[in-house]
Image (spheres, rainbow, N blue to C red):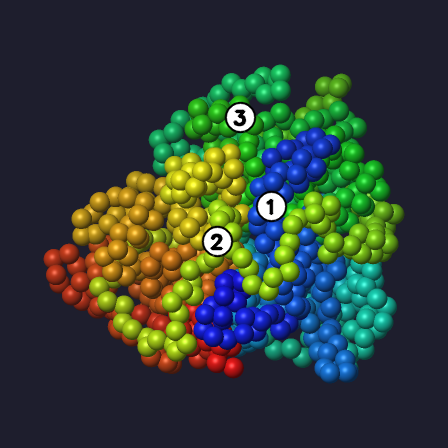
Amino acid sequence: DLAAMRDAMQALGSDPQRINPLNPAELVIDHSVMVDYYGAPDALERNTEIEFERNRERYQFLRWGQKAFDNFKVVPPGRGIVHQVNLEYLARVVFAGGDNGDLLYPDTLVGTDSHTTMINGLGVLGWGVGGIEAEAAMLGQPVSMLIPEVVGMELTGQLPPGTTATDLVLTVTEMLRKHGVVGKFVEFCGDGIQHLSLADRATLANMAPEYGATCGIFPIDEQTLHYLRLTGRDEAQLARIEAYCKAMNMWGADAQKNAVYHSRLTLDLSTVQPSIAGPKRPQDRIVLADAAPAFTKWLNEQNQLTGNQTSEVPCTLNGKSFTMKDGHVVIAAITSCTNTSNPSVLMAAGLLARKARARGLSVKPWVKTSLAPGSRVVTEYLKHAGLLDDLSALGFSVVGYGCTTCIGNSGPLPEAVAQAIKDGNLNVTSVLSGNRNFEGRIHPLVKANYLASPPLVVAYALAGSMNIDLTREPLGHDENGTPVYLRDLWPSPEEIQSAIDANLSSDMFKRLYQDVFDGDERWRNLPGTDAKSYDWPESTYIRKPPFFEGMSLEAPEVKAISNARVLLKLGDSVTTDHISPAGAIALDSPAAEYLRSQGVEPKDFNSYGSRRGNHEVMMRGTFANIRLRNQLAPGTEGGWTRIFPEGKQTTVFDAAMHYQSQGVPTIVLAGKEYGTGSSRDWAAKGPALLGVKAVIAQSYERIHRSNLIGMGILPLQFQEGDSADTLGLTGEEEFTIPAIKPGQKTVTVYVTNPSGETRHFDAIVRIDTPNEFLYYQNGGILHFVLRKLARQ
């Protein structure tokens, strides 16, 4: 986008060099590595090699950006996950600025991933925004929002033995989702904070998007300084942070003594129980003891819906024969910044693996195992403790340093296992230490996905099935035939702490972060150019985006949306994954058809996430999630819709192109929590390129509503008690929405049904601030910024 904006500045007769970050911008490449190889000592090297082969064109482009833009740094592939790198190295906590460096002010940030909130654990205010809003912030635009309500989350007591920070965050996510914190700040307070390590706090803050909050912030205190010291921050910086926070009444519990919250919840940490969450939403927590019966209940519901019968399919893999069944765990992944930033749960996983190995247990042959740490420090301390050998012996070899399975880059299942799942139409499962488990996200063949702590991921890999009650049934038997239970393997808090104290040191962080911006030989050898404007090549990875083509210096008038057709009618909890998937490109999809037409072999399709630099792929991938259910095309799953007035069924992309060729605008109808999940700007860019002019939903997730405005799409909200169904909207009608004016709170929407009868209803205009109206009027936030800079 920034490269295209430089071209647009030139076309508008202005200086392209004005497109340059004004604030420090740090790009961490973590979303591209896939788990092609696993369970072998060379898995990391082979996956990294494939990553560079697949993404060479993208990485060359990023190398250009590294040189072309000022105030912009790139953390190359293979160094870690953005939020963990921020926590362990990049975050300043208190900034020194001003002309002479004599001003101190709090560190704040926005990040282009929703889990940016992880830094709230360090007391830094920050949250996720879409890429377009981040680009505008880089170019000097303020981040505008309505002043939020603040919810106090009081923690008391201590976590009991046998529980982890993962169990705690799943409990908090469930509580806060029920309370309702969308668009609000959550502030953690209470005596229980003192008993949480900084890593535990970061785990809690990380999942703010899952509990729906804008942020989940902790105070700055002694624990903060201890962590900064551990991670190798400078002593002078630590002294400055402490002095500043105390002078500004921002230090520890004292700063919260007289705090008045809009609402308050209390959680006694001693009541937290071992838990997992799933099979489709992170807020659906299940106490571990209830996991097996909960899965059985879900399976029965699935079978009733599909008419499927529970079946068993014989399978042979690597010389081992076994029977595949419903409930089998086919992916067990220790992954994600949420948990791999926390030494306590990783040491626990390693210690559990050591004890399992000592008892002669092994992972079931149908389980694809992986360990993808969020930084290289993790590997270092596990290796130092001798636990990396134990994890590797069970198949949990390091597969890469990046998001991997958590964002859907789980890679292919072994062909024999995949075929057995298809042959039996099996309801198989994944267990991952991630933060999201939405439908179709982890792997297309895996319908039930569960979030769990790293030690429980190892346990489920040993058990091999969600049908086994880990609290009562054995994970396996030792060589004497003696049953081995989870309680026999679970390490004590003392064992875990002892392992951390003996194997984690400040030197590790200092040594491994000293070359964090350099990259390996593959990165350093990428060809680059010193040109200030990008010379766009013929590429299926990087294409000049069309957002600024034909743009004038003056903003157009806001026009009415007249006689629009409904492109999709959707239900509740439609995620940004449903709107713009990040994972595999289905072979029969419009995106695959386009790539084939460009001479790309299916084995080289890569993922939607890796093709985000090519709008041709991404607009075809919009609403292409294989689990999407569009009510206009009943009985289908995936990117299908109907064209009106004919009623002909076709792909969403083809329907959108048909409407555009006829000059017909389109809208989307949706239920509650539209756009929940990742801060994925393509979930707004894609619909904009398809010609969507408005979305009418019952409610929105914060970031996605902002992203829609950022791409010039009007977000409207049904009034309380109204929905598409209560208003009798089938999606076959034509909709007219009068032009919106600044400050307008509601608008009357006119609906004409197929028989020509017109009626109307009022909807809430979700343009929340004056700046947002300017963005909408300009056709998007980047258009607004471009015009502003071009006039200077």
Q: Residues within 10 Å of mark 1 (few under 14, many from 20)?
A: some
Residue indicated by mark 3? 415
* Location of residue 740 by image quarter: bottom left
Residues at marks 1 and 3, CA–CA distance in whole angstroms? 27 Å
Of the pair 724 and 479, the residue shown nearer to us: 724
Residues at marks 1 and 2, CA–CA distance in whole angstroms? 14 Å
Instruction: Report the amino acid beneath label 1.
Output: Arg
The disc, 1 or 2, on the residue closer to the chain's N-terminal end is 1
Of the pair 173 and 45, the residue shown nearer to us: 45
* Location of residue 358 by image quarter: top right
Instruction: Report the amino acid beneath label 3.
Output: Glu
Instruction: Report the amino acid beneath label 2.
Output: Arg
The disc, 3 or 2, on the residue closer to the chain's N-terminal end is 3
Residue indicated by mark 1? 56
Q: Identify the residue at horizontal 12%, vertical 57% (top origin).
A: 755
Q: Residues within 10 Å of mark 2 (few under 14, many from 20)?
A: some
Q: Identify the residue at horizontal 29%, vertical 50% (top origin).
A: 655
Is residue 97 shown left or right of residue 34? right
Are the residues tagged 3 and 2 within 8 Å (C-beta)?
A: no
Q: How many marks?
A: 3
Rendered location of residue 532, percent (x, y)? 59, 64
Q: Identify the residue at horizontal 27%, vertical 68% (top origin).
A: 561
Residue 720 seen in this snapshot: no
Element under disc 2: loop
Q: Residues within 10 Å of mark 3 (few under 14, many from 20)?
A: few
The disc, 1 or 3, on the residue closer to the chain's N-terminal end is 1
Are the residues tagged 1 and 2 within 8 Å (C-beta)?
A: no
Marker disc for residue 543: 2
Element under disc 1: helix
